Image (cartoon, helix red, strand yellow):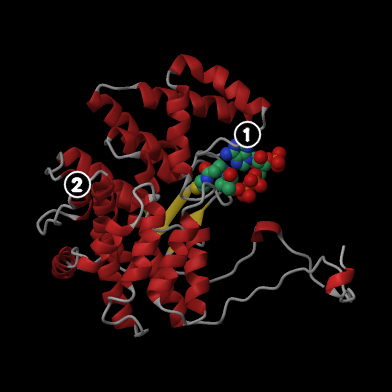
Amino acid sequence: MASATKGMEGIVAAQTAISYIDGMNGRLFYRGLDINELAERSNFEETTALLWYGKLPTQKQTESFRRKMSENRLVPNEIIALLLLLPKQATPMGVLRTAVSALASFDPATGDNSLEANVNKSIRLTAALPTIVAAWERIRKGLWPVTPSTHLDHAANFLYMLTGKEPDPVAARVLDQCFILHADHGLNASTFAARITASTLSNLHSSITSAIGTLKGPLHGGANEQVMRMLLEIGDVDRVDQFMRGAFAAKKKVMGFGHRVYKADDPRALWLQRLAAQLAELSGNQRWYQISERIRTLVQAEKPLPVNVDFYSASVYYTLDIPIDLFTPIFAISRVAGWTAHVYEQYSDNRLIRPESEYIGPLDVPYTDLNSRV
Ligand SMILES: CC(C)(COP(=O)(O)OP(=O)(O)OC[C@H]1O[C@@H](n2cnc3c(N)ncnc32)[C@H](O)[C@@H]1OP(=O)(O)O)[C@@H](O)C(=O)NCCC(=O)NCCS
């Protein structure tokens, strides 16, 4: 019997033409385009179209795509009613997972697995995720959700729905770049979960629900929230050395470092570092950036661990005044572009994903009568 590879490290479980990680050199490509160029020059809507259709859209396609995305931002009233029923202390990721699962029952094409239906469902889902997250943020504060704007772009509209105020253009562009940087990433755990669900020929909403549940964990998308909690606990750059000495002595994992695929620093983290520095400068508050820099110096002097996407995104979102427990939902708002692209790819050449396990338990155990068990 073959032996198990813990964590499936090094196992190639799918072919994909969506994104490529060059882990040795710290490079990431979406459909062959370098992530750095996309973060510099593209926007989330265009990047989503690139991931779904395989190439950059023409001007006409871009306009039509943007229009469709903005026209689909409203969610059914029943979804808002469902959010109103949930306990206020529910986690935003849990709420998002529940709402996306419920949306399946309202989508006119739920059971249609054709590519055309799936693209339309993906537009509706991608457009709806920010509305759900922002609506939950308002509802739990006892406020009424803000009706989505039709003229703002995806990132700016999300900030608008959180506060009801048109966002600062720099903040909106920074968030847009964050969305681009998080949109896809090879066969990460949540994408694999989406593909496994799709491989049973279950529908798109089920695949995305599986993915959201998987992204939530602190070893995956949940790490960005943990990073911010660590920065807050440290509180001041003068306390970093002492804090990290304690973390190293206790052999604690430092969130925002380490990666299964990257051996060099994650290129998305380096972009986010620049954005964190820019926001620190603009806001006049260097504290979180300086603490982050000192942590990175100490961690990387201790162990050759790459800095990952979740490290600097924490201080970026915090400086944008986004509540900490919305950091991972923001990851989901962006990654849904990649998840849905992977679901189409899985359907297009499907075979049930069904690995084996290495059995390590006993065999031929005798059945004991209830009254003789101890
Ligand atoms: C991302 C992650 C889950 C990858 O896990 P993995 O490929 O299974 O790697 P492992 O957890 O087996 O770690 C390998 C070694 O590096 C160490 N390591 C990995 N990440 C570490 C971290 N963040 N802090 C300290 N040590 C770390 C492990 O302790 C282990 O050391 P050992 O061999 O001496 O026991 C892991 O690096 C991690 O938990 N990072 C923190 C969470 C995080 O930032 N997640 C977001 C990922 S984008």
Residue 204 position within the rendered picture, expressed as x and y whole percent measured from the top left:
39, 75
> Which residue is drawn at the image coordinates 47% and 53% (left, top)?
216
Determine whether the residue tagged by mark 1 lies in a helix, strand or loop: loop
Q: Compare residues 121 and 282 and report the one nearer the observer.
A: 121
- Check disc 1 and give the amino acid type: Lys
CB of residue at label 1: within 8 Å of ligand 1? yes
> Which residue is drawn at the image coordinates 57% and 24% (left, top)?
244
- Check disc 2 and give the amino acid type: Leu
Query: Is residue 203 toward the left or the right of residue 134 in the image?
Result: right
- Name the quadrant of the C terminus: bottom right
Q: Residue furthest top?
A: 238
Residue 4 position within the rendered picture, expressed as x and y whole percent measured from the top left:
74, 64
Please name the residue that numbered disc 2 is placed on. Answer: 143
Determine whether the residue tagged by mark 2 lies in a helix, strand or loop: loop
Relative to 175, residue 113 above or below = below
Q: Compare residues 256 and 269 and report the one nearer the observer.
A: 256
Residue 16 position within the rendered picture, expressed as x and y whole percent measured from the top left:
48, 69
Classed neighbour count for the residue bearing mark 1: other residues with Cα under 10 Å, few (<14), some (14–19), many (≥20): few
Please name the residue that numbered disc 1 is placed on. Answer: 252
Q: Compare residues 220 and 174 and report the one nearer the observer.
A: 220
Q: Earlier in the sequence, mark 2 or mark 1?
A: 2
Relative to 171, residue 75 above or below = below
Residue 45 position within the rendered picture, expressed as x and y whole percent measured from the top left:
24, 60
Query: Is residue 302 toward the left or the right of residue 135 in the image?
Result: right
Classed neighbour count for the residue bearing mark 2: other residues with Cα under 10 Å, few (<14), some (14–19), many (≥20): few
